[in-house]
Amino acid sequence: MKRRLVIRFNAPVILTFALLALLALLLGNWTDGATTYRYFSVYRSSLSDPLTYVRFFGHVLGHADYDHYMGNMLLLLGPGIEEKYGHRTTAHCIAATALVTGLVQFLFFPTTVLLGASGVVFMMIVLSSFTEMGKEGIPITLILVVIFYLGGELLDGLTSSDNVSQLTHIIGGLCGLVFGFSIKRHRSR
């Protein structure tokens, strides 16, 4: 009896995110960055412009180039997060992290532009360390992730002057902490 190879769309939220970000990248390349700036970056703009609100979320789909895109893809952590917490929760966590990082950028950094999903990646790094939170106590992996990943970003933010938004990484990680503890509290009821 032959077994058929079946390809499954196993993580629809993550796969859709990755495809949308790839389309945004290709569109940005095709328009020489114009669409990336207009739709997939967040920056200070008029609150009367409807695209301002689109950019609060859409900036996580925008990437400067293919290397930036690949460095921000959620394909390693995302499917496990989506399997553990479900499609809806995963989508809500991504959208909330995008909104929070977009608002922080908009409010506190009026002269710079933010694009990319690194805040979402850091949210997922921290959230993935909550997989054992159903048991009593705090997993040591959570403590180590906070120390090494978020502590490293804090240190980099204080000592380096590159184009990487360490604050976005930290905010994404803090979102992961909030979501992880909120999900645990909600599920333990």
Image (spheres, grey):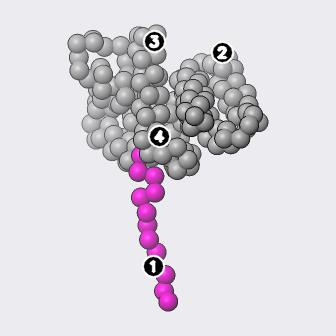
| Residue 3 picture location, percent across and down | 49, 81
**Could you tell me the amino acid type at mark 1?**
Arg
Residue identifier under label 3: 109
Q: Amino acid at mark 4?
A: Thr
Asked if marks 4 and 1 touch (Cβ < 8 Å), the reply is no
Q: Dot 3, how many residues are within 10 Å of its Cα: few (below 14), some (14-19), or many (20+)?
A: few
Image side of residue 137 versus residue 178, left or right: right
Query: Is label 3 in a helix, a strand or a loop?
Result: loop
Which residue appears at 46% of the width and 16% of the height?
Answer: 104
Mark 1 surroundings: few (<14), some (14-19) or many (≥20) residues within 10 A:
few
Q: Dot 1 corresponds to which residue? A: 4
> With respect to residue 21, does 4 lie above or below?
below
| Mark nearer the viewer, 3 or 4 | 4
How far apart marks 3 and 2 lie (CA) works out to 16 Å
Q: Label 2 neighbourhood size at 10 Å, few (<14), some (14-19), many (20+)?
A: few
Checking the image for residue 168, the label placed there is none
Residue 133's image quarter?
Answer: top right
- Residue at mark 4 to residue at mark 2: CA–CA distance: 31 Å
Q: What kind of element bears circle 2?
A: helix
Identify the amino acid type marked 3: Phe
Name the quarter where the C terminus is drawn. top right
The stretch of residues the image draws in magenta is 1-13
Residue 65 visible somewhere in the drawing: no
Residue that label 4 marks: 90
- The residue sitting at 38% across, 47% down in the picture is 16
4 magenta-colored:
yes
State if disc 2 and disc 1 touch (CB < 8 Å).
Answer: no
